[in-house]
Image: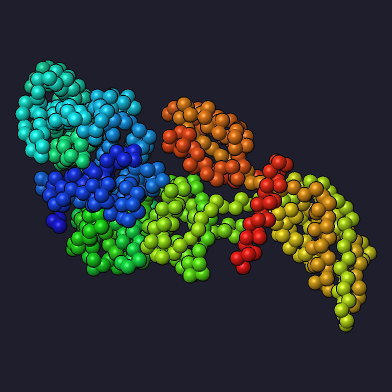
Amino acid sequence: MNSFPVERIRNVGLFSHGSAGKTSLTEALLFLSHTINRQGRVEDGSTTSDWDADEIKRQISISTSVAPLEWRDTKINLLDSPGYADFLGEVRGAMRTCDVALILLDASAGVEVGTEQAWQAADDLKRVRALFVNKMERENANFASTLAAARDRFGSAVVPVFVPIGAEKEFRGIADVLARRAYLFDGANESESDIPDDISDEIEEMRTQLVESICENDEELMLRYLEDEAIDVDELRQGLRAGVAAGQLVPVFAGSATTNRGTKQLLDAIVDCFPGPGATEAKNAKGDTVTLQPDASGPLAALVFKTVADPYVGKLSYFRVYSGTIKSDTHAYDAQKAHEERIGQLYMVRGKEQIAVGEVRAGDIGAVAKLQVVATGETLCDENNVLTVDGIDFPAPAFSAAVHPKTKSDLDKMGSAIQRLLEEDPTLHIRRNDETGETLVSGLGESHVQIGLERMARKFGVNVETELPTVAYRETISTAVKGVEYKHKKQTGGHGQYGHVFLDIEPMEDGGFEFAEKVVGGVVPKGYFPAVEKGVREALDEGILAGFPVSKLRVTLTDGSYHAVDSSEMAFKIAGAQAFKKGALAAKPIILEPMMHLQVTVPEAYVGDVMSDLNGKRAHVQGMEPRDNGTTTIDSIAPAAEIQRYATDLRSITQGRGSFTTEFSHYQPVPAHLTDVIIASAKARAEAQQATV
């Protein structure tokens, strides 16, 4: 593959709501540029960018693919990102890497949830934006209403540059608004002509608005425009490019990816109107901010934005070079981990194809295999000039599943396989719940976790079963009992066993467990106090009603007796445990459930539905705070057991527009009508675990 100077490179990310046609558009552009010789189809599983087995099976993009092509002596790196919310981490990586966010809209659906989320993500990172109205050949396609919806939602900076001629079965061409030229389709052929008479007035109106928008952002052009001085098309295109690069204009294009119509005009616009790589900020070794120009001869700074774990090839790291040049068979320095990495063979990647190259220059995207410690979001630089560019802001997990290996072989391999999976997807997290003993895998949704585990089975041969995590209930007592006696006395020949204790047990409002003693007269020697406490603590872990840990109580050793020969630490430990169990059952034990501070942010229109759903989940709403962007944040306390699938529930209620965060708040008693259900479930689980031992 040819090497290009930075001014001839375009890094364009494709973003949209699910199924708006990003992968099909990528395929069309690759085919049009003669990068591939056959245009694949998502339905056939034959596209360049959706090459993973899971993507072919589900006919959706799961991870970001890089697809470079050459057009008019310019290299265009397309980043085809997923459109579904469960794979937002991949979207964040692509958005961080690209210079221009090309957001697709379905011509029959208009502005959807994913459209808004992509726009906001681009806004957060200050990315240049452009819109492509796709599927103009489909039934109910309507460019005018889609454009109106986009301008209503995103503002007057949205300006049509190439617009469709006709729609649905009558979609017959593309009009260049600035040049007043039409490109008409006749099967696979395209011919250039004047604007057809039936749409000339409409195009002229659009042109007037476009010219005004361009001139508003250029003082010299505005003066000439106001003086009715002629401004030629090339000058207007230069003004358009400047406005787009400054983020003041959002150009709109239209076409059909599957029929490859409007794609040539889009490629030309990417070359003519989209900005190339620009300067970026980094931190040096002293923590000072420095500005890096996209200069191939500058200091090296490359961000790893994606990692693919392959059981045969090993780890493949995708990176974008912001400054300098990275070469094959050299060394680079991981700025975050302070570790030197050997750089082997470099590649340009197109889908699953790896094209060996000798170097990757500033502004370009490449990949390298078998890096030892570098992870996604970290910077490769020169050890003598340490630089760190901003990483990737990955979203926090919203759904967790407990995983259990199916076989002993799976158990042996599960730990390393999950770690490889986490290298590939930083939005997946793993942790062990010490209270329940379960291994939890967390992600952005049920589908995200399930697909990740299926990928682990396919790639690394590790099969697991999943279920909702066991809720970490606790138990306590609701009344105090005093003078609970237990005497452990056993004679078996020789030394016997003797331990005799009296305990007071009382609930505490706060804290976990407190042990005290008020023994007088030496009836129980001090040397046995720790043994009594140890017995009580072990009984706490075994639970009272359903085997959950016991907390929020104080146990006081008040009296007892001992035998000079037969007493021992073990005897007093047993006596302490049995006295506690006896007393706890008499102290009206109850089950406590973990309560979470749940903060939900939704558009105003969904507040009522969300509130109703929260009430059904036994949540206590504590307040609402309207925000300037039309959303409302609802603060509530909700039982952990009721919100384990809240990521899915909220997505369904708000059509994906809502978000939430949770953190542990406190424990509180379970309602009486649920106690028997929890006890029965816990006993059934314990019996099932015993049966597998």
Using the image as rendered, state which of residue 509 and residue 291 is in the foreground: 509
Residue 320 in sight: no
In percent of width and height, residue 571 lies at 83, 71
Q: Position of residue 336 (x, y in %)?
A: 39, 58
In the rendered view, does 63 fall on the left or right side of 606? left
Looking at the image, is 550 positioned above or below residue 229?
A: below
Q: Is residue 228 visible?
A: yes
Residue 244 location (% of width, % of height)? 22, 34
* Residue at left offset 33%, top offset 59%: 308
Image quadrant where one finds the C terminus: bottom right
Q: Quadrant of residue 674?
A: top right
In the depicted view, which residue is nearer to us: 458 or 655? 458
**In the picture provided, is 660 more to the left or to the right than 38?**
right
Identity of the residue drawn at 51% across and 63% down: 405
Q: Residue at x 23, y 63 (%)?
A: 346
- Where residue 121 sits: x, y (%)? 36, 39
Q: Quadrant of residue 233?
A: top left
The outermost residue toward the bottom is 494
Residue at image coords 39%, 45%: 88
In this picture, residue 650 sits left or right of residue 489: left
